[in-house]
Image (cartoon, grey):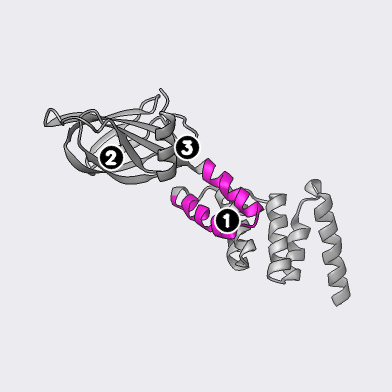
Amino acid sequence: MKIPYTVLILVLILYGCVSTGNDGPFQPAEAPLMGMIYDTENNPVTGAEVIMDGTNTALSDINGNVILYRVTKGEHSFIIRKKGFEAVYCTLNVSSSRQVLYTALTSMETILDKLEKALTLNKTGEAALLRTQAWKIDPDNAQYRYLNTVYLVQTGNYPDALQEIKTLLKIYPANPSLLLTEVKILSSGLRENSRALEVLQSIPSSSTTDEITMLKKIRLKEKNDVQ
C-alpha cells in the first residue's frame, strides 16, 4: 500500500508525524490507531518500533503498517525508531478513530550519500549538519568515520582527522588507502614529513599504487634535501 503523493510530500518536508482522516467523532472512548512507517524513498520500513507516551509500543510489519491499541482522544507523544535510521520524535493530536499516522524515517545510508555529495562539492555547512545526523545514528560506522575524516581535513582540523584514521586502521589494519590518507594528513596538514615518510614506507609493496610510489619519491627527495 503506497502513501498518497500529497501526503508523502508533506511527510518528506516535515520528517515527522502526519495524520489523515481526522474528521468525525472519536468513538468509542478508546480506539486503535493505525500507522504507516516508510523511508524517504517511499519504501515500507519493517520492524520499526513505535512508542506512544513512553509505554504503548508496537512494531511495523512487512508492509510498514503498525497498530497501537487503546488510544484515547487528545495529544500523544511518539517516538519512531529503528536501528540504522534517524529516530523521529513528534506529538499528534488524536481527534478521530479514523486517523492514520504517517511517518518517514531517514536511513543512515541516505544521510551518508548526502554527506559524501556535500563534501565532494565542499559544502561544509551542509556537511556539518549531515555529519551530526549520522553521528546520532551510528558514530562507529566505518563509512561515517571516513567521511568525517574528510570533513575534518576540509575544515582544517588535522589532529582529529588523524585520530579518526588511526581508529579506522584498528578496524582495517595496513589498509593502503587509509595509510595514504594518514600520510597526506601528516605531510600536508600537520607538516610532519618524517612521520609521513615512516607511514609511507610501511605500506606493503604488493599494494603500491602510482600515487603512493610518487609520494614515496617526493618524501625521499625531501628527506635527502634536508640532509
Which numbered disc, 3 or 2, marks the residue that appears first in the sequence? 3
Look at discs 3 and 2 and give the one toward the viewer. 3
Quadrant placement of the C terminus: bottom right
Residues at marks 3 and 1 touching, judged by CB atoms closer than 8 Å: no
Packing grade of label 2 (10 A; few <14, some 14-19, many >=20) is: some
Q: Residue at image x 80%, y 46%? A: 206
Q: What is the CA distance from the residue labelled 3 to the residue labelled 1?
A: 23 Å
Q: What is the CA distance from the residue labelled 3 to the residue labelled 2?
A: 20 Å
| Residue 124 horizontal/vertical position (percent) | 59, 59
The extreme left residue here reads 29
**Quadrant in the picture for residue 73:** top left
In the image, residue 6 sits, relative to residue 91, either above or below, namely above
Disc 2 residue type (three-letter): Ile
Residue that numbered label 1 is attached to: 148
Q: Is residue 84 visible?
A: no
| Residue 208 horizontal/vertical position (percent) | 80, 49
Q: Residue at image x 34%, y 40%? A: 17
| Residue 68 horizontal/vertical position (percent) | 24, 31
In the image, residue 194 sits, relative to residue 32, either above or below, namely below
Residue that numbered label 3 is attached to: 40
